[in-house]
Amino acid sequence: MEIQHKRSWSYRIVRPERLLALGFLIIILLGGLILAMPVSGSGGRCAGLMKGMFTATSAVCVTGLTIMDAGTQLSTFGQAVLLVLIQIGGLGFMTFATLIMVTLGKRLTLRGRVVLRDSMNQTTLGGTVRLSLHFLFLTLIIEAGGALLLMLRLIPLYGVKKGAWYSYFTAVSAFCNAGFDVFGGWRSLTHMSHDPLFLLVICVLIVLGGLGFTVILECLQHRLRFHRLSLHARLVLLLTGILILSGTLLFWLTEYQSEPFKNMPWHVRLINSLFQAVTLRTAGFASVEQAELSDSGKLLGCVYMLIGASPASTGGGIKTTTVLMLVVLVLDVVRGREHIQLLGREIPQDTARRSMAIAFIGLLLVLSAVVLISIFERGSGIPTIDLLYEVVSAFSTTGLSSANTPSLRPASQCLLMPLMYLGRVGPLTLAFALAQHSGEAAARIRFPEEKIMIG
């Protein structure tokens, strides 16, 4: 009995979702310590532990919120460390651990394969190592292709050395939906807002990163034949297209007379409206100043940031398919249907329950954080809408800011760090935990049924 108890205790300690959360945390701590060292600072200046930890948290959680200008306050070594943290955060540390194991000729243990499966949001153990390597190689190819296209614009502006480095860093940051840049001056991509080719390349990288690796592989395998794709892939493609088109139209309408857009030619305004709709899918790059958007544009942005990208992608948010499940569930309740159906397929009820749990906990975290940060920033003069924008941006791992993150008080900055961590790790591990416990819950003793009044 004692041996069985110890085994049970050991299994609870090393559950896959706990290993994933712990792995992200360890990488954040190590990255923060390195970024805080003088060797990572520009001119050998020490950035400080607070700036290092905040930047590492934002990078590993692929958020983009920062209190340190990477272009001017980090050395080349520091920027390279930041890039590695972004890449690990975008792909997941288990993918890199698998690559190291394969390189050393080691075999991944069964427990390691379980963690790897969960980190990639898969349902079976078969082929997980091979699939993770496919993800890695696909990522490198897409990022290299994006960097080459960006060089067409950045090398003429900055020269070969800087232009190539800026292009590669920006391509990796865009595909990983991180939103970090090394241009300097806290300007993100605002200095490129009149360059349609540059913005379109960034948009393509963001969208590919937000689709999810399994969807990209399916599209390549079936040569974009929509009817041969799985239900998940078809839904992700449809939802992504709807969100991009609707977002472009809505931002065109709501920001037509706002300060960043009103003086732009119509085609430039259209491209920047498209870019705003795409970057809100948790990418975090800004082609226009977010503080100058209208309140309606910021509220709309909060909605799109909360929705975020798709599962098993480099993006954050509560995910597109989660929101779709909530919408379909509401419609089925209104219509009196007992079963959830989509595109000729029936969806398990457990999926709908987990979607509601993820959405509810996400909204609860956001509302709690808004209340706390509004208390911390009392008397600062920052409008509540900007604080809401900041909190949603942190939780959804987007990285856009209209409140100027460095100007926030230390207590608010400290609050944003666990919020970014929970936004990146929380919904993911929650989904795994709920999925694992669903079978256990069904086997428990059931009590007598009794109705209560609602509504």
Image (tube, grey):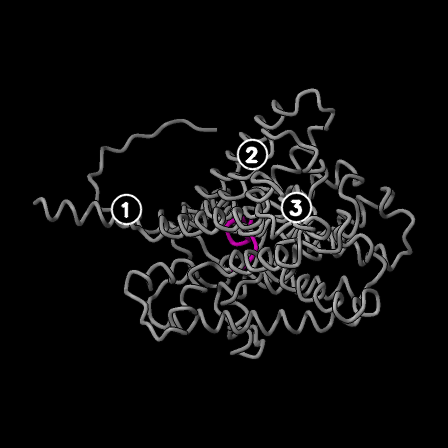
Please give the label number shown on residue 414: 2
User: Measured from the top left, where is residue 300 in percent x and y?
Assistant: 69, 42
| Relative to 145, 344 lies left or right | left
Query: How many C-alpha atoms fall within 10 Å of the one at disc 2: few (<14), some, or many (≥20)?
Result: some
Of mark 1 and mark 2, the one earlier in the sequence is: 1
Residue 327 appearing in the image: no
Q: Are marks 2 and 3 in contact (CB under 8 Å)?
A: no
Q: Which three-letter amino acid code belongs to the residue tagged 3?
A: Arg
Secondary structure under tag 1 reads helix
Please give the label number shown on residue 13: 1
The residue singled out by tag 3 in the image is: 45
| Relative to 264, 294 lies left or right | left
Mark 1–mark 2 distance (CA, rounded to whole Å): 27 Å
User: Which mark lies nearer to you, 3 or 1?
Assistant: 3
Q: Which three-letter amino acid code belongs to the residue tagged 1?
A: Ile
Residue 201 appearing in the image: yes
Q: From the viewer's side, name the closer residue of 132 and 265.
A: 132
Q: Residue at x 77, y 54 (%)?
A: 189
Q: Are marks 1 and 2 in contact (CB under 8 Å)?
A: no
Q: Is residue 18 above or below residue 110?
A: above
User: Measured from the top left, where is residue 197 in percent x and y?
Assistant: 79, 67
Residue 269's image quarter? bottom right
Q: Residue at x 68, y 53 (%)?
A: 279
Residue 220's image quarter? bottom right
Tell me the magenta residue range: 313-323
Secondary structure under tag 3 reads loop
Of mark 2 and mark 3, the one earlier in the sequence is: 3
Mark 2–mark 3 distance (CA, rounded to whole Å): 23 Å
Q: Residue at x 33, y 67 (%)?
A: 125
User: Which mark lies nearer to you, 1 or 2?
Assistant: 2
